Every structure is written in C-alpha cells, then in structure tokens.
Image: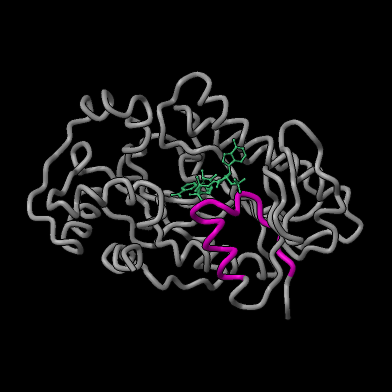
C-alpha cells in the first residue's frame, strides 16, 4: 500500500536518507521546509513563529519530526537556545497541527536522543524502562523535546536515537578525514560506552515503527550491542587502515570543542529492548558491520 509520509528536517542526515528510502519504494513524501518551496511535494513552515495549518498533515499516514539545530558546534548561549527551541517548537507545532486534522495520521514519530538517560551512566544497562536523568544540557533538552509532543491526539513514538554512523554526517564524518590520513584518534579514556546505530538501521527502524500497529511511547534506536568508545575507534581504524591511535584527553577536547565534549563522550550503554520486543531485527547489530555500512 502506498503511504503518504510527512517529514520535518528532511534535508538532514537521517531525514534525507528516510525520504530517499520511502521515495525509492514508491511512497509519497511531503517535506516541511523552512525556505521557499521548490516542488508540489514541499510545504513551507515556520516553526516557532507560526502555527502550521492542519491541512498540511491531513490524510498523512505518518508524520516524522527529524528537525533540530546542529549540536556539533560551540554551545554559546545563543546556540543553546537554538538547540532547545528548534526541537521543542517543531515538536509542539506538529503536535498541535495533528490535533486539528480531520483525517489524522496513525502515528507521530518524533526524534529524541539517548541523552534522555543523562550525561554518564557508566556501565549500567539502559532500556526504555530505565529512569531518565537531567544532569546536563542535552538531557534537559531531550526531556523538554519529548514533553513538547503532549498536545498530539494520535500515538507518539519518541525515537531515542543513539550515535548514527555515516560518512555523510554526524561525529563519524568529522573524524573520518583524520582516520583516512592514517591517524586514529580516541576521545577521552576510550572506556565509556557508545551506543551507536547504522544509518541504514535508523531508517529501517523508523519505517518499522511507522507501520507497526501498536507502536507508541519511547523506543531506543541503537544497535543491540553497544561497545566502549575504544572499540568504535578500533573498528574505524581497521576499516580505513589507520595505523596509530592517539588518545585525546578530555581537557584538550573541552578546549577545542567546548562543553559539548564532556556531554558527548559520557558513557551510555543503551539497548533497544522495545524494538526487539516489537519484532525488529537489526541489519547491523555490531560495530564492525555498522562501520562498514557507514563507509559504503
Ligand atoms: N545523527 C545522530 O547521531 C543523532 C543522534 C541523536 C539524536 N539525533 C537527532 O535526530 C534529529 C535528526 O538528526 P540528523 O543527524 O538527521 O540531524 P541533521 O543532519 O543536523 O538535520 C537536522 C535538520 O533539522 C533542520 N533544522 C536545522 N536547524 C533548524 C532550526 N533552527 N529549526 C528547525 N529545524 C532546523 C534542518 O532541516 P530543514 O532545513 O529541512 O528544515 C536539518 O537538516 C536531530 O534532531 C538530532 O538531534 C541525531
């Protein structure tokens, strides 16, 4: 059956891969864009300043929110505001528009992140039943982001995304040129757990939830086997032939990247229990195959 899918944040890493995947399979994708529209499949919106007409979402099967200002730049006071508001206002605007539809979507899939569980939980195994924590900026953002969907009148899935691996964006894309030059860099001690996910599995998991009749609530979008950051670095080094590994101490990272460094390298060992219970199987359950996927 052909679906009509509405995506916000469709120009981003995950949004553009999701859009391509749906379009390749013949589904109709409507993109919410913040610029002038360039095709009949685009609708302009201005989240934060204007309400979105419910007509934009009327008759859609699923609405997916993947919008948010980048967290990969220095967290000045202005940028912190942008990180928070670009997530809460998009989620709220979509939830309110959904509430006004006459033919509502079955489900609203709204991005969140594994920082919902806090900055650093050591070796603790974290499932969707684990308590959240608000001990840092991104954890607070994740909580506000999820709360911002509360006006939705249809079931909401909060996509608690882990570190999505792709050569086209995110942390791995930033590290890759250094690794390709032959130098593996290992942020911090190498001991913290990194909960990653291949971009292919991120798209597959979102599509899985979009058609699952009971999907609702939080879902950890991570691979089932989180590894210590050193193992991530080793897998990437092996894949691109980097020979030396240089540990970068946390104070140096802080100096170069600012506060984002401390939060980005905290240990979170998150597993996707609810996806597994719902019957989802990962194509790339381990770090080696996820890195291979990221480089293809
Ligand atoms: N990639 C990861 O590893 C990861 C991990 C955890 C959580 N997430 C979250 O998942 C979502 C999608 O991730 P991604 O990697 O695809 O992000 P991305 O590549 O940075 O794309 C995010 C998209 O959000 C829109 N956007 C940017 N600034 C905005 C603003 N000020 N206001 C409203 N929209 C804005 C843009 O799309 P338009 O120009 O089309 O509007 C942009 O392409 C993000 O919210 C991200 O925080 C990602």
- Of the 4 image quadrants, the one containing the C terminus is bottom left
**Left or right of residue 84: residue 152:** right
Residue 11 within the segment the image draws in magenta: yes
Q: Which residues are magenta?
A: 4-22
Q: Nearer the viewer, residue 30 or 155?
A: 30
- Of the 4 image quadrants, the one containing the N terminus is bottom right
Residue 7 within the segment the image draws in magenta: yes
Report if residue 81 is visible in the image.
yes
Report if residue 128 is visible in the image.
no
Q: Nearer the viewer, residue 221 or 120?
A: 221
- The spot of residue 128 in percent (x, y) is 52, 51
Colour scheme used in the picture? one colour
Q: Residue at x 74, y 67 (%)?
A: 4
- The spot of residue 219 in percent (x, y) is 55, 55
Above or below, 108 relative to 51: below
**Left or right of residue 256: residue 84:** right
Residue farthest toward the left in the current orientation of the protein:
244
Above or below, 19 relative to 100: below
Residue farthest toward the bottom in the current orientation of the protein:
1
Q: Residue at x 68, y 40 (%)?
A: 90
**Left or right of residue 202: residue 191:** left
- Ligand 1's quadrant is top right
């Amino acid at each position: 059956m052909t679906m009509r899918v509405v995506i916000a944040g469709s120009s981003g890493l995950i949004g553009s891969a999701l859009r391509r995947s749906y379009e390749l399979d013949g589904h109709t994708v409507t993109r919410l864009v913040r610029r002038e529209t360039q095709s009949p499949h685009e609708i302009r919106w201005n989240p934060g300043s204007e309400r979105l007409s419910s007509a934009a979402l009327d008759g859609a099967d699923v609405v997916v929110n993947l919008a948010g200002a980048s967290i990969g730049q220095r967290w000045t006071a202005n940028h912190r505001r942008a990180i928070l508001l670009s997530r809460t206002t998009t989620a709220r605007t979509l939830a309110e528009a959904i509430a006004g539809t006459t033919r509502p979507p079955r489900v609203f899939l709204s991005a969140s992140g594994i920082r919902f569980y806090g900055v650093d939980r050591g070796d603790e195994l974290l499932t969707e039943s684990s308590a959240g924590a608000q001990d840092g900026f991104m954890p607070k953002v994740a909580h506000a982001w999820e709360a911002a969907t509360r006006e939705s009148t249809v079931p909401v899935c909060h996509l608690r995304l882990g570190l999505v691996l792709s050569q086209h964006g995110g942390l791995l894309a930033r590290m890759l040129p250094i690794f390709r030059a032959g130098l593996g860099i290992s942020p911090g001690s190498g001991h913290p757990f990194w909960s990653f996910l291949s971009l292919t599995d991120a798209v597959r998991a979102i599509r899985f939830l979009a058609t699952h009749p009971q999907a609702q609530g939080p879902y950890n979008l991570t691979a089932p086997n989180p590894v210590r950051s050193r193992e991530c670095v080793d897998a990437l080094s092996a894949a691109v032939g980097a020979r030396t590994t240089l540990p970068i101490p946390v104070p140096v990272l802080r100096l170069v990247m600012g506060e984002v460094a401390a939060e980005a390298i905290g240990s979170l060992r998150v597993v996707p229990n609810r996806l597994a219970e719902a019957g989802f199987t990962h194509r790339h359950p381990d770090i080696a195959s996820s890195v291979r996927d990221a480089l293809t």
